[in-house]
Amino acid sequence: MTATKSTYNKEDIWELISEVTDPEIPVLTIVDLGIARDVEYKDGTFVIRITPTYSGCPAMQAIEKEIEKKLRLNGIDNFEIKTDFSETWTTDWMTEDAKKRLKEYGIAPPGKTEKVDNFLKSLESSGDHVPCPYCDSENTEIQSEFGSTACKAQYYCRDCNEPFEHFKCI
Amino acid sequence: MSTQTKTLTKKEALFEYLVRLADDRLILGHRLSEWCGHGPILEEDIALANVALDYIGHAASLYEYAVEIEGEDRHRDDLVYFRNDVEFKNLKLTELPKGDFGFTIARQFLFASFSYFLYTELSEVEDEQFAGMVKKHLKEVKYHLRHSREWVLRLGDGTEESHERIQDSIDDVWTYVGELFYQDEVDEILQEHNLAADTETFKEEWKELVVDTLEEATLEVPDFDQFMVEGSRQGLHTEHLGHLLAEMQHLRRSYPDGNWQ
């Protein structure tokens, strides 16, 4: 039998999973994004709770595998990853620093979510104003509400003529 | 008229309710996924595939909760791959072939607008886990509604051909939309415990949104009181569902214990 008593505590586990990056947006970690929620130590097992950004996000499985790899490489076997569907993920959980790195990477970061009192009325307006991540121009237009991943929309900058992605604000 | 004699328990009713919601989203998600690689333009190919993924994600969390409620140690995938057509409770609206882009958009708009009101109600149910997942889904449903509504406007008020095609699609799909509001014992039992929405409470608002959108799109609004198909929630389906399931379930049934490794 191998020693199951780990010298790791849950803060160490959190530290380790803070190094796991999102496979689709490698400049951000799963902690930056708010995908990793918390770590609990229960009956000899570390329970890592994660929540998807979008309900159908196909990166979730890859993320689980990455967490698993990270922990096993550090000799930790007594853990369990729990996907929690009940939390309502929001881009407001993203740190300012993460937003800055996102912009440097060429993705326009999400703004603050606003409480829309009348969603049906808002259907008639044309959506958010998103500045270009390359030249900061406000003269941009939406091309599609859907992009290369569930969390992004496609925009075009009329000033520098660059197409770019916007991390949707939800 | 109801022929059911057995009264369901609250737990049985909740399981059934979750499965109905999940089946709608799984089947429609599968239908939409057929557009992947076939969209009329790249942006729409991506958009429809994204919406399909959202629906399958919604279905996954609803099935997950359903098997948890059931408590018989079933996996959510068992519900997806090992049930036959008569055991699926999805609305016939969701299983109809994808048709042309106009048909897909017409169905999307009618389903998304209904889902928006339904989920707004459901996000208030007295069940933290259920309400939590619905709140998440609702954020995505808003995108689906915005997307499909804009296309209804563009196609209806577009060229002669796009106008004609989307009008035909609205007319063709119309007979399947009445069932969106179907309610029976399952809904009634849960409504008593504030665990389900009452579709009657938002029917008029939904109609208003549909009428306003179709009129703005210069389209004719069919008669809400015309003949509407029934029976989906009892497992009665069109011939199309069997073909869809054959494709969706074939691999899993051929290799029941197969695993991606």
Image (cartoon, coloured by chain):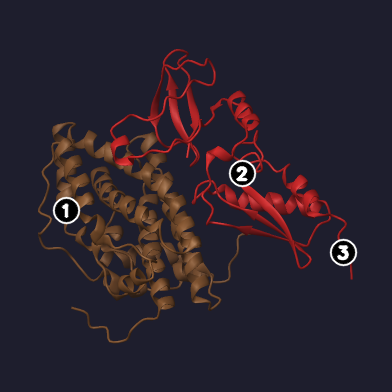
Quadrant in which the C terminus of chain B appears: bottom right
Secondary structure at badge 3 equals: loop
Q: Amino acid at mark 2?
A: Gly
In the image, farthest residue toward the bottom: B5
Query: Mark 2 packing: few (<14 Cα in 10 Å), some, or many (20+)?
Result: many
Badge 1 marks a residue whose secondary structure is helix
Which chain does tag 2 point to? A
Q: In the image, which is nearer the foreground, mark 2 or mark 1?
A: 2
The residue beneath circle 2 is A34
Residue A42 point in image, percent of width and height: 74, 65
Q: Colour of chain A?
A: red
Disc 2, SS: loop
Q: Amino acid at mark 3?
A: Lys
Task: Find the distance from the CA under tag 3 to the CA under tag 1.
Answer: 65 Å
Query: In this rendering, is residue B155 above or below A155?
Result: below
**Separation of disc 2 and disc 1 at Cα?**
44 Å
Residue underneath mark 3? A5
Pointer 1 residue: B172
Q: Nearer the viewer, residue A86 or B259?
A: A86
**Discs 3, 1: same chain:** no
Mark 1 burial class by Cα count in 10 Å: few <14, some 14-19, many 20+: some
Q: Residues within 10 Å of mark 3 (few under 14, many from 20)?
A: few
> Chain B colour?
brown
Image location of residue B204, percent across then percent down? 19, 53
Vertical position of residue B135 compared to residue A110: above or below:
below
Q: Is residue A126 left or right of residue A7?
A: left
Question: Residue at image x 27%, y 46%?
Answer: B109
Image location (x, y in percent) of residue A59: 58, 47
Chain under label 1? B
